[in-house]
């Protein structure tokens, strides 16, 4: 009998989310080694789900692997921020424009819910929750663009964009500004103003990148 054995997805997912949250809350700091045995003991699991989670996080850009040092938390620098946001600036406004042109209110419901939940996270100053809600809001607006490859490319940037957001917020907590900008983008989308929503989103992404680069120096 041949085949591969895999752990239940739920166990790896739990470990994955715990490590992701640790990185986004800066409990796991940039450059910190991620030792499988230590993480496994801390999370009460074997090393296998930890190893699998680190592979996923490496693919999503939160973890880097070195031949000699193993896994560690990625460090956000100006080059990384520019490269991620350059792709977003090109693709995401166009994807949102196409989503709005679908004229399907159901496509905007999750964005509205994420925006609502973000107001609570802002009050609690919960950076990790805000980061996850931020990417949920953005994905809700671009996922209906009708181009699976475009959605896939933007999805691949989600974790990197979330970490870059946390770095920017550490230097300048501009959550309320982003929340207001999100409201404007969603309002334009609900009106069916595809070009307006795309333009507002482009300004939103570009403005945040400028603040991040100033923070990084």
Image (cartoon, rainbow, N blue to C red):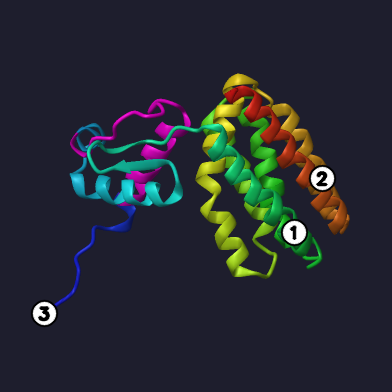
Q: Quadrant of the N terminus?
A: bottom left
Could you tell which of marks 3 and 1 lies nearer the N-terminus? 3
Q: Which residues are magenta?
A: 12-37
Q: Is residue 203 left or right of residue 19?
A: right
Nearest the viewer among 141 and 74 is: 74
For the residues carrying marks 3 and 1, which lies nearer the camera in this image? 1
Identify the residue under disc 2: 200
Report whether 178 appears left or right of 134.
Answer: right
Q: Residue at x 58, y 67 (%)?
A: 149
Secondary structure, mark 1, is: helix
User: Where residue 1 is drawn, which disc sits there?
Assistant: 3
Residue at image position (59%, 55%) is 154
Using the image, determine if residue 123 lies above or below residue 112: above
> How far apart are the alpha carbons under marks 3 and 1?
49 Å
Residue underneath mark 1: 94
Q: Residue at image x 26%, y 45%?
A: 50
CB contact under 8 Å: marks 2 and 1? no
Residue at the (87%, 51%) spot, across then down: 196
């Amino acid at each position: 009998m041949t085949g591969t054995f895999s752990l239940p997805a739920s166990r790896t997912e739990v470990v994955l989310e715990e490590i992701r949250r640790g990185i986004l809350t800066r409990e796991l700091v940039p450059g910190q080694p991620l030792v499988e045995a230590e993480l496994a003991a801390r999370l009460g699991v074997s090393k296998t789900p930890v190893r699998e989670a680190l592979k996923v996080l490496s693919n999503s850009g939160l973890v880097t692997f070195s031949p000699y040092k193993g896994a560690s938390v990625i460090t956000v620098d100006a080059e990384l921020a520019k490269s991620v946001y350059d792709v977003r600036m090109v693709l995401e406004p166009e994807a949102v424009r196409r989503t709005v042109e679908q004229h399907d209110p159901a496509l905007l419901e999750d964005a509205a819910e994420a925006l609502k939940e973000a107001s609570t996270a802002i009050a609690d100053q919960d950076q990790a929750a805000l980061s996850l809600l931020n990417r949920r809001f953005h994905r809700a607006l671009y996922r209906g663009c009708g181009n699976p490859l475009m959605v896939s490319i933007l999805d691949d940037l989600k974790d990197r964009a979330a970490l870059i957001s946390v770095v920017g917020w550490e230097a300048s907590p501009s959550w309320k500004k982003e929340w207001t900008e999100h409201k404007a983008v969603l309002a334009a989308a609900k009106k069916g103003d595809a070009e307006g929503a795309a333009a507002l989103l482009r300004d939103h992404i570009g403005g945040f990148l400028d603040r991040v680069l100033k923070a990084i120096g």
